[in-house]
Image (tube, rainbow, N blue to C red):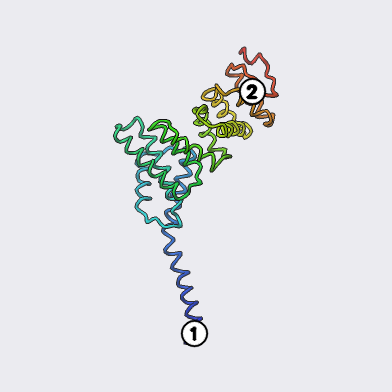
Amino acid sequence: MTSHARLRSLLLLLGIAGVIWPLSALPAFWVAVPAKETTGRILAGDRFKPRALNATMAMLEAQPRLSVARNDVARAEALIGLRIAEEGTGRRSAEDTDREAALADAKIRSSLEINPADSFLWLMLYSMETGYRGFDEKTLGYLSQSYATGPIEGWISLRRNKLALAIFSNLTGTAQQKVVSEFAGMVDSGFIDAAGLNLMGVGWEQRERLLASIANVNVIPREALAKQLAREGLKVRVPGIEVDERIWRR
């Protein structure tokens, strides 16, 4: 075979491969689309009918786990499994609840094996473990992983900060500082309602430290937090903010 003929053969093989790969990968893309849509809706807090969640999970599990969509599908399965377990609590028998929790736990761990940098799923693993098995040093490591992989995640902080403040005294000094900084970040980002509820609730014992952490936060969110606390009748001082005491007497 001449060099010219060999070149033509090589180009032909490359052309065939270029056609076959998209065709073989196409099913994975079709699987990834509903996976991403479902994941987005779950994270946005949308509600689903149990049958819809179960049907979506069955569809995802039935597909071949091709590498091009592996991460998206695994994450979708983890979040769907978690939602099924959450919504089943109190509605199903203890046996069914435990089974769904175990399945969700396995799905979350499987997704984290593929993408160990998923800060939200580390948080969900911590939440699952403490919710069903109680708090211990091992589960605390999952919370630490969430902070390590996503220390500045505004939307994750809305869940994480409350969970972390609830076990604040069990955290190391470094971990405590991350939680306090996260609270300050929430205020600075305008999540005033969530930050205020955390302060008035699970973070009340740490209120002086939490309030001190926002001393350098923009004045507008500081004022908003001060007014929120005053409307609740709490006489606490937000750094650099003077609140009319008449608000406390309303």
Q: Residue at x 68, y 16 (%)?
A: 244
Give how far across and how far down residue 162 sits, in percent: 51, 30
200 and 179: which is toward the camera: 179
Pointer 1: what residue? 5
Q: Residue at x 30, y 36 (%)?
A: 96
What amino acid type is highlighted by mark number 2? Answer: Ala
138 relative position to 200: left or right: left
Give how far across and how far down residue 62 sits, in percent: 34, 52
User: Compared with residue 137, is residue 55 higher up or lower down, i.e. above or below?
Assistant: below
The crowding category of the residue bearing disc 2, from other C-alpha atoms within 10 Å (few below 14, some 14 to 19, many at least 20), is: many
Dot 1 falls on a residue whose secondary structure is helix
Tell me whether circle 2 and circle 1 mark residues in contact (CB < 8 Å). Answer: no
Which of the 4 image quadrants contains residue 127?
top left
Q: Earlier in the sequence, mark 2 or mark 1?
A: 1
What amino acid type is highlighted by mark number 1? Answer: Ala
Which of the 4 image quadrants contains residue 184?
top right
- As drawn, the residue found furthest toward the bottom would be 2
243 and 45: which is toward the camera: 243
Q: Residue at x 38, y 32 (%)?
A: 133
Residue 226: mark: 2
Q: CA distance from mark 2 to mark 1?
A: 80 Å
Give how far across and how far down residue 25 sits, in percent: 44, 61
**Quarter of the figure with the C terminus:** top right
Dot 2 falls on a residue whose secondary structure is helix
Give how far across and how far down residue 150 sits, in percent: 55, 42
The crowding category of the residue bearing disc 1, from other C-alpha atoms within 10 Å (few below 14, some 14 to 19, many at least 20), is: few
